[in-house]
Image (spheres, rainbow, N blue to C red):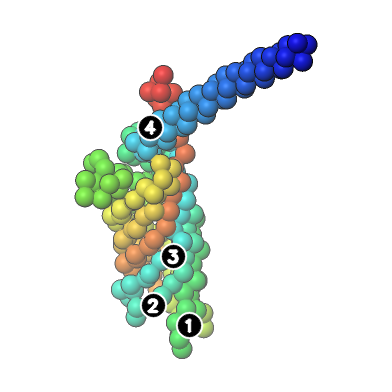
């Protein structure tokens, strides 16, 4: 009789522990679900707000294909970091730096540099044909130079550029982009002017500002 009572007591304790464990698991799973739902809502909100006022854009162009207007067509590699702040929805102002190295077979080596201000405007809403895409226009103004080895044409002075581009957001915070720009350089040196039409590829990281973060939080509530 005593053994039966002990078995019954053990079964009751075991069932009690199992019930407690199930309650803990249910609470934990609910927390995971709520956290996942909040994260999804957060990313969804940011996905529609990359280019809102107060956000920050950081990135650059990694590879440029240079279609020279003054010189024969050559291939060039440029590094052009950029950073900008959205002063209002769709409009960003910031700065850039540039360093480029151009080489061609049986030709001189060309180095280029630049530093200055940039402005960017994103047009319209998401492209319907290609979802999560935006057309934009970019213009820059700064100081730059192009210097060719072995007595080539050198120009250092005012550097201006303008052109259209397209950004495709592969995530809510990262956009891949292509940009076609006309670049003009006016200054002093053996050649007073140089120009080219430049097709570039790069990426930008869009960091939400306080306004966007508050908007997302309010949308989630």
Foreground label between 1 and 2: 2
* Cα separation between marks 4 and 3: 31 Å
- Circle nearer the N terminus (1, 2): 2
- Circles 4 and 2: CB atoms closer than 8 Å: no
- Circle nearer the N terminus (1, 3): 3
Residue shown at 72% from the left, 17% from the top = 7
Foreground label between 4 and 2: 4
Q: Is residue 32 above or below residue 156?
A: above
Under circle 3, the secondary element is strand
- Circle nearer the N terminus (4, 3): 4
* Cα separation between marks 3 and 2: 13 Å
* Cα separation between marks 4 and 2: 43 Å
The residue tagged 1 is 108
Q: Quadrant of the C terminus?
A: top left
- Circle nearer the N terminus (4, 1): 4
Under circle 2, the secondary element is loop
Foreground label between 4 and 3: 4
Can residue 124 be seen here?
A: yes
- Circles 1 and 2: CB atoms closer than 8 Å: no
Q: Which percent across, then down, holds residue 200?
A: 38, 62
* Cα separation between marks 1 and 2: 11 Å
Foreground label between 1 and 3: 3
Residue 63: which disc?
3
The residue tagged 2 is 74
Under circle 1, the secondary element is loop
Residue shown at 57% from the left, 19% from the top = 23
Q: Which percent across, then down, holds residue 218?
A: 40, 20
Q: Nearer the viewer, residue 5 or 156?
A: 5
The residue tagged 4 is 45
- Circle nearer the N terminus (3, 2): 3
Residue 9: which disc?
none
Residue shown at 41% from the left, 23% from the top = 220
């Amino acid at each position: 009789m005593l053994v039966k009572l002990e078995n019954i007591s053990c079964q009751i304790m075991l069932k009690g522990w199992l019930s407690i464990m199930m309650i803990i698991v249910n609470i934990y799973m609910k927390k995971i679900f709520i956290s996942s739902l909040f994260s999804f809502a957060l990313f969804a909100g940011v996905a529609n707000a990359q280019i809102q006022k107060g956000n920050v854009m950081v990135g650059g162009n990694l590879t440029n294909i240079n279609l020279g207007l003054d010189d024969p067509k050559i291939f060039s590699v440029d590094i052009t970091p950029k950073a900008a702040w959205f002063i209002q929805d769709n409009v960003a102002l910031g700065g850039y730096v540039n360093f480029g190295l151009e080489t061609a077979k049986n030709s001189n080596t060309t180095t280029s540099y630049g530093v200055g201000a940039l402005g960017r405007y994103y047009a319209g809403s998401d492209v319907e044909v290609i979802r999560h895409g935006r057309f934009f226009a970019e213009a820059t103004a700064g100081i730059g130079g192009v210097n060719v080895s072995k007595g080539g044409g050198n120009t250092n002075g005012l550097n201006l550029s303008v052109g259209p581009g397209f950004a495709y957001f592969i995530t809510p915070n990262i956009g891949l982009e292509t940009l076609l720009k006309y670049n003009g350089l006016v200054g002093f040196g053996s050649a007073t002017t140089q120009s080219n039409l430049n097709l570039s590829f790069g990426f930008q990281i869009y960091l939400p500002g306080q306004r966007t973060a508050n908007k997302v939080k309010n949308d989630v509530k």
